[in-house]
Amino acid sequence: MSSWASPRPKIELRNLSMVYEDRISGRKVEAIKNVNLDIYENDFAVIIGPNGCGKSTLLSIMAGLLKPTTGEVIIGGKTRPGPRDVALMFQDSLLLPWRNVSKNIEFGLEPRHLSKEERASRVEKYLKLVRLEEFADAYPSQLSGGMKQRVALCRSLAMETDIVLMDEPFGALDEQTRIMLADELVNIWRSVKRTVVFVTHSLSEAVYLAERIVVMSSRPGMVKAILDVDIPRPRTFASPHFAQLLQTLWQMMGQGSSERF
């Protein structure tokens, strides 16, 4: 556990199970089963696991978008998380093409009845964090994929929730851009001190980012292991400790060792 995190859980998952039913065939699919997990305040937890193990389902339950079949989620002591408790960022930036960068970031703030000045102040603050101030008036069609994701990250951070949930936000980007955004995300996390839960398929991305790595089993997804990442920051792929932990994850996942970031 890093010096940023306290022993008090910010997110508590208790005996979570989720069963989906196909409306046509009636077939039931158990996505996750008996998941118990604590995510701590100011933690950076990364969830990995095989395809179909329920990682995204778990994130949607934490966000309050799905109701589990059994079990409960406790967010900051509350059993019913709402939009003011968590912000959710997806692999697709989901920017509105008719709004410029500033207005896209401001979009999530509009229902909160903040003053125009307060909204503008937040937009400016987070654009500076990701170094996009000069693109405040640009439209999504004028941005690269990495820039769009930085705007999406701004939009999530501007909500100023204690918890940011991220579902493979860099998955569609090229390797160089992913590393660049990973560095920015870590710097922002250390600066604003939020609780981050990050889902990825990339084991090297997990080691690069995480304070703790949650390893899920194949479906139905269960917590297979939780590994502390004690590698000092900034991290490098050439570090022996990095390679050792990556190899441990490969062995746990039952895969080869040729993955790239």
Image (cartoon, helix red, strand yellow):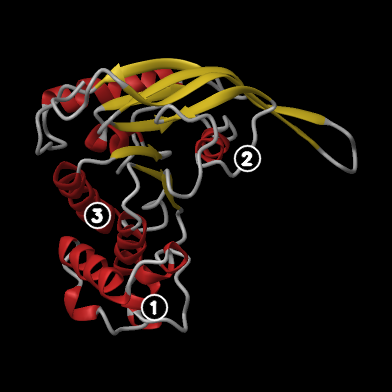
Residue topped by disc 2 = 66
Residue type at numbered disc 2 = Leu
Q: Are marks 2 and 3 in contact (CB under 8 Å)?
A: no
Q: Quadrant of residue 61?
A: top right
Sooner in the amino-acid sequence: mark 2 or mark 3 = 2
Residue 162 got which mark? none
- Disc 2 vs disc 1: which is toward the camera? 2
Whole-Å distance between the Cαs marked 2 and 1?
29 Å
Say whether marks 3 and 1 touch (CB < 8 Å).
no
Q: Are marks 2 and 1 in contact (CB under 8 Å)?
A: no
Give the mark, 3 or 1, whose residue is nearer the N terminus. 1
Q: Residue at x 19, y 64 (%)?
A: 125
Q: Is residue 120 above or below residue 54?
A: below
Q: Nearer the viewer, residue 37 or 116?
A: 116
From the top left corner, tell me how far across and down residue 153 is, in percent. 32, 58
Q: Residues within 10 Å of mark 3 (few under 14, many from 20)?
A: many
Q: Position of residue 83 (x, y in %)?
A: 48, 49
Give residue 213's quadrant in the image.
Answer: top left
Vertical relation: 222 (above or below) 200: above
Picture layout, residue 65 above or below residue 233? below
The secondary element bearing badge 3 is classed as helix
Image check: 76 left or right of 30? left
Image quadrant where one finds the C terminus: top left
Give the SS element for disc 1.
Answer: helix
Q: Nearer the viewer, mark 2 or mark 3?
A: 2
Direction from residue 175 to residue 192 in the image, left or right? left
Q: Which mark is residue 140?
A: 1
* Mark 2–mark 3 distance (CA, rounded to whole Å): 28 Å
Q: Is residue 29 visible?
A: yes
